Image (cartoon, grey):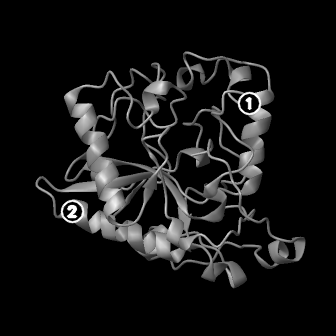
Amino acid sequence: MHRETCFGKVLTCAALAALSVTTLAIAPADARRRAQPDGASQSALVPLDSIDASIVLDMRYATARNFTGAPVPGYEAPACWLRPEVAKALSRVQADLAAADPPLSLKVFDCYRPERSVRSFMRWAASKEDGASRHYYPQIARSSLIPSGYIARASTHSRGIAVDLTITRRGGAGDANSKGGTSGEQETRPCTEAAPMGGELDMGTSFDCFDTRSHTSAGGLSAEQRQARDTLRRAMARRGFENYPREWWHFTYPAADDGRSFDVPVR
């Protein structure tokens, strides 16, 4: 997610200017209304649903259902953009899960993240506690999130090579594509006690839980929760993804890393 250290190159101002995006006009028949990058950025970032529309999208940072308690600057549309190679590899994972018994599906929470969004995380972490999203970090003060390494100044998400996701069962509520997040009231129980939603497998914590229980190999999990994490990790590793050990939901695809980061908003 946002805790790993970014060591890649930052684009020049000229290169960033060439990567400006606009919202494409979509035919009314296309109910999905895909938002996607244009021009020079189209070869670098592509919408995941243009590669595999079967993957469930629940793009949390375009909504208030995230650890900041509000839509995050830079996420102007609930769309998942990734490097083409990453999107294709993710589609291969999806095909593997669909062939499982019972069939499963990926459910994505975050993909490409503009650098401006990362900076907004830093501002939020340094701001005064308001309690609005305390359930995402029940055991630690907001002022300690940066020094404790839970929020960092840069992220591999900004390179378009990282994705935050879980596994959901097919054929139920979790199989419905929900780009803007699931309906109903926001979950307010501590993230370490949150029940899985929309057909998701029980991973032991919710997404974006700032707690040691979110570590992929954390102790104290039930046999079901351990099996769910192992299923996700193995499925992703089979197709070239690497897990971030402090977050069971975060994976990167190193083969697509050319060192470039982006700061174009998701529109």
Specify few, some or many for label 2: CA neighbours under 10 Å numbering under 14, 14-19, or 20 or more: some
Q: Name the residue that disc number 2 marks.
A: 98
Task: Give coordinates of residue 17: x percent, y percent.
Answer: 84, 75
Please give the residue where the numbered disc 1 appears in the rendered image: 125
Q: Relative to residue 35, is residue 179 drawn left or right?
A: left
- Residue 109 in the figure: left or right of residue 197: right
Residue positioned 67% across, 48% down in the render: 5
Place of residue 201 in the rendered image (x, y in percent of width and height, measured from the top left): 27, 40
Q: Residue at x 46, y 37 (%)?
A: 207
Say what amino acid the circle numbered 1 marks. Answer: Ala
Q: Earlier in the sequence, mark 2 or mark 1?
A: 2
- Residue at the outermost right position: 13
Quadrant of the rendered image containing residue 129: top right
* Residue in the foreground of this view, choosing between 77 and 93: 93
Q: Residue at x 54, y 17 (%)?
A: 138
- Look at the image and tell me whether residue 199 can be seen: no
Name the residue nearer the viewer: 2 or 112: 2
Q: Disc 2 versus disc 1: distance between alpha carbons?
A: 38 Å
Q: Position of residue 221 (x, y in %)?
A: 30, 25
Q: Residues within 10 Å of mark 1 (few under 14, many from 20)?
A: many
Quadrant occupied by the C terminus: bottom right
Question: Mark 1 falls on what kind of element?
Answer: helix
Name the residue: 36% across, 69% down.
Answer: 91
Secondary structure of the residue carrying tag 2 is helix
What's the residue type where badge 2 is placed? Ala
Can residue 182 be seen?
Answer: yes
Please state which of residues 170 and 224 is positioned toward the viewer in this rendering.
Answer: 224
Q: Which mark is residue 89?
A: none
Instruction: Give the image quarter of residue 26.
Output: bottom right
